[in-house]
Image: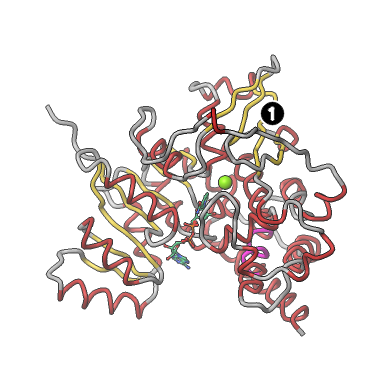
Amino acid sequence: MTTPKQRVTVLGSTGSIGVNTLDVLARHPHRFSVFALSGHSRIDLLFSQCLAHQPQFAVATDPLAATELQSRLAAAGSRTRVLLGHEALDEAAAHPEVDMVMAAIVGAAGLSSCIAAARAGKRLLLANKEALVVGGSYFMDAVRAGNATLLPIDSEHSAIFQSLPTDRALWPSVVDKIILTASGGPFRTRDPATLAEVTPEQACAHPNWSMGRKISVDSATMMNKALEVIEAKFLFGLDPSRIEVIIHPQSVVHSMVQFVDHSVVAQLGVPDMRGPIAYGLSWPQRIESGTGVLNFSEMAGLTFETFDSPGHQARFPGLCLAWDALAGAPGTTALLNAANEIAVAAFLDARIRFDQIHAVNQATLEGFTFSSPASLQEILALDEEARAHAHHLVRRLAR
Ligand code: NAD
Ligand code: MG
């Protein structure tokens, strides 16, 4: 008897993670089929992905893009149906014929479709860390209520998941701490006094990873690691004091778990997101991923640096906002994410300086009052209000 193919929806298929996911899926045509794809812009790419993978649905969240995609697919004789708008993302995520959803949209725009997949009990492969930072325990409750399987795709969290015992019930009693590694990004050794001069191109030139522009800027400010600390807290249910960050410039050790007996288990690999993507798709089995192999004989060395030097504290002031936000009322992590999305977009548009990203994030955390959200609508409303507040701060700085 042949095993039925797993049907996969890839949300954000035109992005860096989306493209890598389709690369892994294409290596295993007997194991997976693509059910739906989604893209916001880059319609040329979405069009060619539809021709190559022949999904039942393609969601175009931008109305102009949807019309263009529809007419091009019709002219090419494709049977892929085009759906329009953000509600269609929820449909593509929760559709009864879908087995797995790759959540690879960037930012809070992906939250609603993640919740839809969670409630529908899917295997949810989470790259879209902002969705978990915004949704927090509401997100995790939806995973439990829907009996969904949530698997991390972020390389650090995949590494931690691979290092932890299979039996989740053991985690609270056996784990002493988790240690997230951070490459330090493009400015690890830069004089902090010169950060005001950083251009978007410099900030997006990551030394080890090729990624979308938003996460590249987050890696340069280290806000990516702050979001990952928050992501780890919700995924693994550990007290924030048990989460540590260490700089590891080579990005070979993807993260580690220290147990109560002080034994440390780490996961290593080349820096290529197809590794964690293949693991999420095949767990608990393993499949070929397309990544290279680690060559230990050519490795010059693996080095580690702590954050507590004055240089790193001046370079990466945003990292500690993770613990500040986790200590705040439920919803505070959503504020931090909203501020950061607005600040990064403003920096990429050259409206504020690189160092002002932190100023916007900190001022939003300190100056915005709210009541904790209890529903998806309230979370999305809080996200909107916090964005408006951050926009206001950006306008003041941009004057
Ligand atoms: P990207 O910018 O390359 O792609 C983002 C995708 O989201 C695109 O398909 C885009 O069309 C879509 N999108 C953007 N705005 C949207 C909106 N408003 N509504 C609907 N769709 C929208 O980003 P990426 O680098 O692939 O990252 C995707 C997610 O994965 C992010 O949350 C990022 O933090 C996370 N992640 C990425 C990497 C990486 O190596 N790129 C590693 C770990 C985690
Ligand atoms: Mg990561």
Residue appearing at x 48%, y 49% in the figure: 127
* Left or right: 390 as drawn, with respect to 85: right
The C terminus lies in which quarter of the figure?
bottom right
Residue appearing at x 64%, y 19% in the figure: 173
Classify 10 Å Cα crowding around label 1: few (below 14), some (14-19), many (20 and above): many
* Left or right: 156 as drawn, with respect to 195: left
Q: Nearer the viewer, residue 257 or 58?
A: 257
x and y percent of residue 288 in the render? Answer: 33, 35
Q: Nearer the viewer, residue 86 or 193?
A: 193
Amino acid of disc 1: Lys
Residues in magenta? 336-342
Label total for image: 1
Residue appearing at x 14%, y 30% in the figure: 2
Residue underneath mark 1: 177
x and y percent of residue 338 in the render? Answer: 63, 63
Main secondary-structure element of the magenta-colored stretch: helix
Q: Quadrant of residue 4?
A: top left
